[in-house]
Amino acid sequence: MISDPKLPFAKSPGVPEVEPPPAASSYARVPPSVAAPPHSAGLRLWLRRIGVLVFVFLCATAGVMLMILPWRPEWTDNHLLLPYPALRSFVGSGFVRGVCTGLGVLNVWIGFWEAVQYREEG
């Protein structure tokens, strides 16, 4: 048996009738500035400031470490590389040290670029 889609469903006994929700256009539109309380906007602003500060600090710290550490003796004279002389000579090569230093410069650049480009809304 095929039912006609235009006909309403037959009501079953004991089942309450549920009304469909109103159309989305009938809801009142609330602007975003009114929807969020003022202290929430201030909290969001401070969390963003702290997030940018932490990001810049981590980028700068990792970048300086990557610029300095490859040229120190600890770079190749550590207990992780002692059992692997071939890897130790590869890590100690000027190419790998230069690549690490370049990544450090790039990391510092990204951190300071983020700090310079930071703008607050509002």
Image: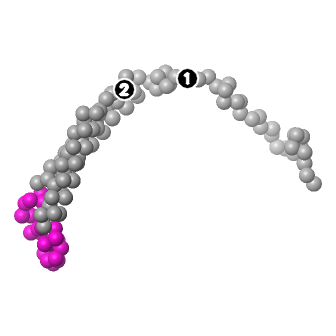
Residue 102 in the image: state x and y as whole percent.
18, 53
Residue 77 in the image: state x and y as whole percent.
9, 69
Task: Tell whether 109 sits left or right of 16.
Answer: left
Instruction: Return the residue found at the far front.
Output: 95
Q: Is residue 42 above or below residue 48?
A: above
Mark 2 is surrounded, within 10 Å at the Cα level, by few (under 14), some (14 to 19) or many (20 or more) other residues, namely: few
Task: Tell whether 35 sits left or right of 112.
Answer: right
Instruction: Tell me the residue that label 2 is attached to.
Output: 121
- Closer-to-camera residue (13/37): 37
Q: Quadrant of the C terminus?
A: top left
Give the SS element for disc 1.
loop
Instruction: Return the residue found at the far right.
Output: 1
The span shown in magenta is 69-92
Residue at image point 12% right, 60% down: 70
Residue 2 in the image: state x and y as whole percent.
91, 52
Amino acid at circle 2: Glu
Earlier in the chain: of badge 1 and badge 2, it is 1
> Is residue 95 visible from the viewing direction of this image?
yes
**Residue 30 tag number:** 1
**Residue 82 tag number:** none
**C-alpha distance separating marks 1 and 2:** 20 Å
Residue at image point 39% right, 27% down: 41
Task: Tell whether 45 sits left or right of 57.
Answer: right
Give the SS element for disc 2.
loop
Indicate whether residue 34 is drawn in magenta: no
- Closer-to-camera residue (113/121): 113
